[in-house]
Image (cartoon, grey):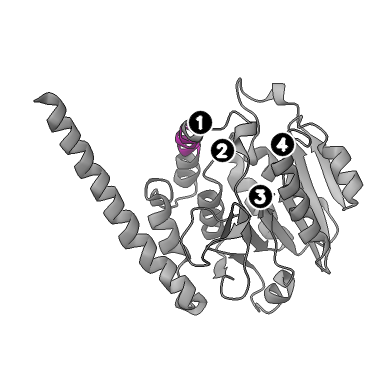
Amino acid sequence: MKALWQVSFRPIGKSKINDFYQNLFVDSIKSINFDITFSLTQFDEQNVETFIKEKNIKNNYINFPQHQLPKGKKYSNKIMLDNALSQFIEGNDYQYFIYSTADIIVPNNLFSILEGIKNENFCAFVYPNTHVKNNKIENTFWPHYGIDLIIFKISKEKAIYFKEIIESYNQYDWGINENFYIASSEALKLQKFNLFKSCNVLKFDNDFQAFTEDRSWQIESWKENKTYFMNFLNKNKLSKFYANGSYYYLLYKIFNLRDLNLNLLLSYLIFYPFNIIKKLFNIIRKIYIYKKDIK
């Protein structure tokens, strides 16, 4: 069996921290005994092609010149996906189509777990990630934001349909990817499987200081992509809560008793009360500050 793995790398040589994490990611893929080809669409990021050649991993490499993007944009996950689906459709007998970021360590038992799923077509993922901060693994059940590894087992016919439905979608820079991919799995009528109880995905914090990508930039990027995402949801008759409900709706959609273990149950129990109380506290705090300021 074969897998096409859609991923994109940050510039090599700009941040030692990011370079180290990307090396770990590629090495974790190479340690898996499976026929994997990277689908790489890069946007003029320096030294990536050389890096991939040196790591000696099969790849379909495309450089999309950054100047062809809208002004001020750095990259587009929609363009990456469109290229990857074309490669999947035109390729030779891929069974798995995989999306991930390049700041994770992939579990080496991933495909043995996937092969245990009997469905002909499905969507699998790992939530929550196991967060690594300051080179230390934090607890394995805290509900961090982000689904950074999503696997589709789909036929070529499903891949063709996938490519058709994303004609109504655009995306630039940061944000909304996991919401989009989980919504897409619903549009493709795929059963969802959370592999958390069978494997861990280690997630690292990128060195954002090496780039102009602070939290305000992420928020503005997310808001802009939400408009594109709403168009995709409307065109494909999917719930707008995928965009408006954020992670509250997303975690509801991926919940299944079959996938639960103690740590995942703890994650859900923490996420909903903790975040709801935190939001209420922030609202009350803003009201209090506002009233105090107008006195």
- Seen at 66% across and 79% down, the residue is 118
| Distance Cα–Cα, label 2 vs label 3 | 12 Å
Q: Residues within 10 Å of mark 2 (few under 14, many from 20)?
A: many
Q: Going from the N terminus, do you reach mark 1 or mark 3 first?
A: 3
Q: Secondary structure at mark 2?
A: loop
Q: How far is the residue under mark 1 from the one under mark 2? A: 8 Å
Q: Secondary structure at mark 4?
A: loop
Secondary structure predominantly adopted by residues drawn in magenta: helix
Q: Earlier in the sequence, mark 4 or mark 1?
A: 4
Q: Nearer the viewer, mark 4 or mark 1?
A: 4
- Quadrant in the picture for the C terminus: top left
Residue depicted at x 80% and y 67%: 32
> Which one is in front, 10 or 80?
10
Q: Earlier in the sequence, mark 2 or mark 3?
A: 3
Which quadrant holds the N terminus? bottom right
Estimate the spatial distance between the alpha carbons at disc 4 and disc 1, rounded to whole Å: 19 Å
Q: Which residues are magenta?
A: 218-228
Instruction: Tell me whether circle 4 and circle 1 mark residues in contact (CB < 8 Å).
Output: no
Q: Residue at x 60, y 40 (%)?
A: 167
User: Which residue is tagged 1?
Assistant: 217
**Residue 219 on the magenta span:** yes
The reply, left or right, for residue 120 in relation to residue 28 is left
Q: Classify mark 1: residues with Cα within 10 Å, few (<14), some (14-19) or many (20+).
A: few
